[in-house]
Image: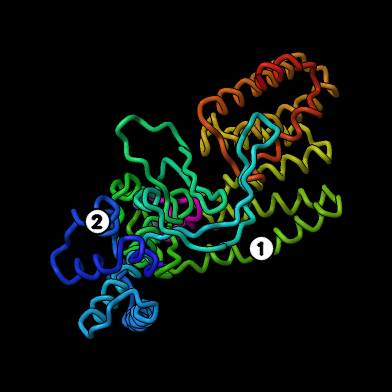
């Protein structure tokens, strides 16, 4: 790719600008774009630099064999030097091209991206490669063939910078792991909103043994620190032992759930919730687990417990993902299905499932209309359920959405 870049911008011109002052005017905007790209030179170790040096010499030799350079010792060296420079720029700025399955679903024209993808190449893009990283990006990218497509993921104000993430996000990763990864992979200190304001991700935090606060575990440096009492590298044996035991409960719960023994599954899921709450800082708010308990309790006929858990799951999804999110809307439909079943078996006249359902549909419509929506297939699965299982005559609402 470095060689190709040099060919695109003209080999003799590239050679000359590397040896004389950086003559941006000679190359027009494209050349200055290449010059403005960050280089990976500073964060590659000496062994890797050695490999790049060898590769650069091979590329220069190749250019020579292809009669692209008029061979003189100093020309050869300068060709190898800018090849080297370009390789570092390519490493720091290229995108992996994924063999992604992108399609419009039959459901409200949402774009679906298949999560099972594999890399088929790398590419340097004159525009897309210039997008900066943010740990809380407002756009994301996917591949259609060898083209990069960017979609906004939130409303973007006029004049606001459009940022993507370079493989690390605030919602998944603690602050120190983000800093470490970006520094060592791309060579920069992140100045995004999340990093500048010290936003910490606490979803995997343990309970601090010293103060019961949130203890952050870092993956890259294998250390820990407490956000409340500032303790560092504390002994996590107590939390770890609960987590160790919780693995056993999780396996039992999954096994009994799979074979349809819901009463036993429910017992183990509840045990797991307790164990998580003793180890993880937010363990008692485990979203998946609360939902599984609700489903098991529905199966075993413990409707009050199920209702309580569905409601808890619903509220947590609202807090975590926001009201206009596919996650929350999915739970809203599921909760309503539960209420519908409950209504049929009880005399409770306060539940108006039809109104709830219509509200959920309207919320879905608003969410989709707000912007072009794209999501992985797994997040869209619930949409397939809505229409055939709709317990009410809501054909008109569907009609208005599809128009
Ligand atoms: Zn950041
Ligand atoms: Zn602490």
Callout in the foreground (2, 1): 2
Q: Circle 2 sits in a helix, a strand or a loop, which is it?
A: helix
Q: In the rendered image, which quarter is residue 53 located in?
A: bottom left
Question: Is any part of residue 211 visible from this angle?
Answer: no
Task: Locate the N terminus by quadrant.
Answer: bottom left
Q: Position of residue 301 (x, y in %)?
A: 83, 36
Question: Residue 27 bears which disc, if any?
Answer: 2
Q: Tell which of 287 and 68 is nearer to you.
A: 68
> What residue do we see at 29% from left, 33% from top?
159
* In the displayed structure image, the side of residue 113 where residue 179 appears, left or right: left
Question: Residue 247 bears which disc, if any?
Answer: 1
Mark 2 and mark 1 lie on one chain; the one further toward the N terminus is 2
The single residue placed furthest to the left in the displayed view is 21
Depicted 177 relative to depicted 392: above or below = below
> What residue do we see at 70% from left, 37% from top?
382
- Tell me how the rendering is colored: rainbow
Q: In the rendered image, which quarter is residue 72 located in?
A: bottom left
Q: Which residues are magenta?
A: 200-214
Q: Tell which of 106 and 240 is nearer to you.
A: 106
Q: Tell which of 180 and 81 is nearer to you.
A: 81
**Label 1 CB sits under 8 Å from any ligand 2 atom:** no
Tell me the chief SS of the magenta region.
Answer: loop
Q: In the rendered image, which quarter is residue 55 located in?
A: bottom left
Could you tell me how far apart the alpha carbons at marks 2 and 1 are, in whole angstroms?
A: 60 Å
Q: Position of residue 141 (x, y in %)?
A: 48, 47
Question: Is any part of residue 236 visible from this angle?
Answer: yes
**Label 2 CB sits under 8 Å from any ligand 1 atom:** no
Q: Are there few (<14), some (14-19), or many (20+) residues within 10 Å of tag 1?
A: some
* In the displayed structure image, the side of residue 217 where residue 360 appears, left or right: right
Q: Position of residue 228 (x, y in %)?
A: 36, 52
In the rendered structure, does residue 205 fall within the stretch colored magenta? yes
């Amino acid at each position: 790719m470095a060689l190709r870049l040099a060919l695109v911008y003209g080999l003799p011109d590239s050679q000359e600008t590397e040896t004389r002052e950086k003559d941006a005017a000679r190359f027009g905007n494209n050349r200055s774009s290449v010059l403005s790209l960050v280089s990976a030179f500073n964060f590659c170790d000496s062994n890797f630099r050695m490999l790049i040096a060898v590769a650069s010499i091979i590329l220069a030799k190749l250019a020579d064999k292809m009669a692209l350079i008029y061979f003189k010792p100093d020309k050869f060296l300068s060709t190898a030097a800018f090849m080297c420079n370009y390789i570092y720029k390519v490493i720091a700025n290229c995108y992996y091209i994924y063999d992604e399955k992108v399609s419009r679903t039959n459901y409200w024209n949402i774009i679906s991206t298949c999560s099972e993808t594999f890399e088929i190449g790398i590419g340097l893009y004159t525009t897309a490669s210039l997008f900066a990283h943010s740990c809380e990006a407002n756009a994301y990218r996917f591949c259609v063939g060898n083209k990069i497509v960017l979609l906004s993921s939130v409303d973007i104000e006029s004049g606001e910078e459009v940022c993507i993430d370079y493989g690390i996000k605030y919602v998944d990763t603690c602050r120190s792991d983000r800093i470490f990864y970006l520094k060592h992979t791309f060579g920069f200190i992140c100045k995004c909103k999340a990093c500048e304001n010290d936003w910490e991700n606490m979803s995997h935090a343990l309970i601090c043994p010293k103060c019961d606060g949130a203890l952050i575990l870092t993956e890259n440096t294998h250390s820990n620190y407490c956000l409340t009492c500032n303790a560092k590298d504390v002994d996590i044996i107590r939390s770890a032992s609960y987590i160790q035991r919780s693995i056993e409960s999780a396996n039992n719960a999954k096994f009994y759930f799979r074979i349809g023994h819901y009463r036993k599954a429910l017992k183990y899921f509840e045990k797991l919730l307790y164990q998580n709450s003793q180890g993880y800082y937010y363990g008692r708010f485990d979203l998946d687990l609360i939902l599984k308990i609700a489903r098991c309790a529905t199966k075993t006929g413990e409707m009050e417990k199920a209702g309580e858990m569905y409601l808890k799951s619903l509220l947590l999804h609202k807090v975590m993902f926001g009201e206009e999110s596919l996650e929350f809307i999915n739970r809203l439909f599921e909760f309503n299905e539960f209420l519908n079943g409950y209504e049929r078996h009880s005399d409770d006249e306060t539940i108006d499932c039809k109104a709830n359902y219509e509200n959920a549909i309207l919320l879905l419509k608003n969410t989709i209309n707000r912007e072009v929506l794209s999501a992985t297939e797994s997040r869209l699965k619930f949409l397939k359920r809505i229409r055939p299982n709709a317990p009410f005559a809501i054909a008109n609402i569907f009609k208005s959405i599809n128009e």
